[in-house]
Amino acid sequence: MEKITFSRTDISEETQLMMIRTSELVKQLNNLTLADFSKKQDIVKELFGDVGDNPFVGDNFHCDFGKNIHIGDNFHADYNCTMLDVVEIRIGHNCLIGPDVGIYTAGHRLQPEGRTLDGYGIPVMIGDDVWIGGHSTILPGVVIGDGAVIAAGSVVTENVEPLTLVAGNPARLKKRIG
């Protein structure tokens, strides 16, 4: 997948306005309770780029832009989910994301000189019927195949094949499913 670079010091007015809008929508979302389920769904539909049927986003959700997040039907993200969506995050149908999961498209250069001035983004793609266990981290550029399971506490640094279970830091194949 293509790495897209961006400046952290030369942010356009349009981008600033988008970030402000996102911040306001995220605060509205996080101030609602589970009793406000339909209102939460309405905000998710306004915040994300594309939303399938029956989305659920738990308490304390955070993202950069929202518009770069695309989710399928029956999406479920538990509490404390963070998605750094400087570029696209695509998540298929029937996906479960456990608590305290981070999905990151953003990164920075390794050399300290100028590290705070710019960054990059690489899209993340997550297939259908994927389960990401709590406290897992998905790093930039990762593709997770259909039906895969990411064990709790995993750090996914490489692509994950369909119908596999991966675990650990870095996440490694533990077994094939089915």
Image (cartoon, helix red, strand yellow):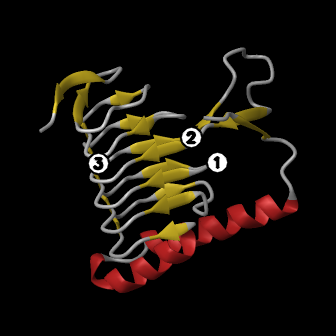
Mark 2 lies on residue: 105
**Amino acid type shown at disc 3:** Val
In this view, 31 is above or below 146: below
Judge the density around disc 2: few (<14), some (14-19), many (≥20) Cα neighbours within 10 Å: many
Mark 1 lies on residue: 86
**Amino acid type shown at disc 1:** Val
Q: Quadrant of residue 54?
A: bottom left
> Contact (CB < 8 A) between labels 2 and 1?
yes
Residue at x-position 52% and y-position 50%:
89
Element at label 1: loop
Quadrant holding the N terminus: top right
Quadrant holding the C terminus: top left
Name the spot of residue 74 as percent of width and height, x first. Answer: 30, 67
Q: Quadrant of residue 48?
A: bottom right
Element at label 2: loop
Judge the density around disc 3: few (<14), some (14-19), many (≥20) Cα neighbours within 10 Å: many
**Amino acid type shown at disc 2:** Thr
- Nearest to N terminus: mark 3 or mark 2: 2
- Residue 164 in sight here: yes
> Contact (CB < 8 A) between labels 3 and 1?
no
Mark 3 lies on residue: 130
Element at label 3: loop
Of tags 3 and 2, the one toward the viewer is 3
In the drawing, what numbered circle is on residue 168? none
Residue at x-position 32% and y-position 81%:
37
Name the spot of residue 70 as percent of width and height, x first. Answer: 50, 61
Residue at x-position 27% and y-position 83%:
35
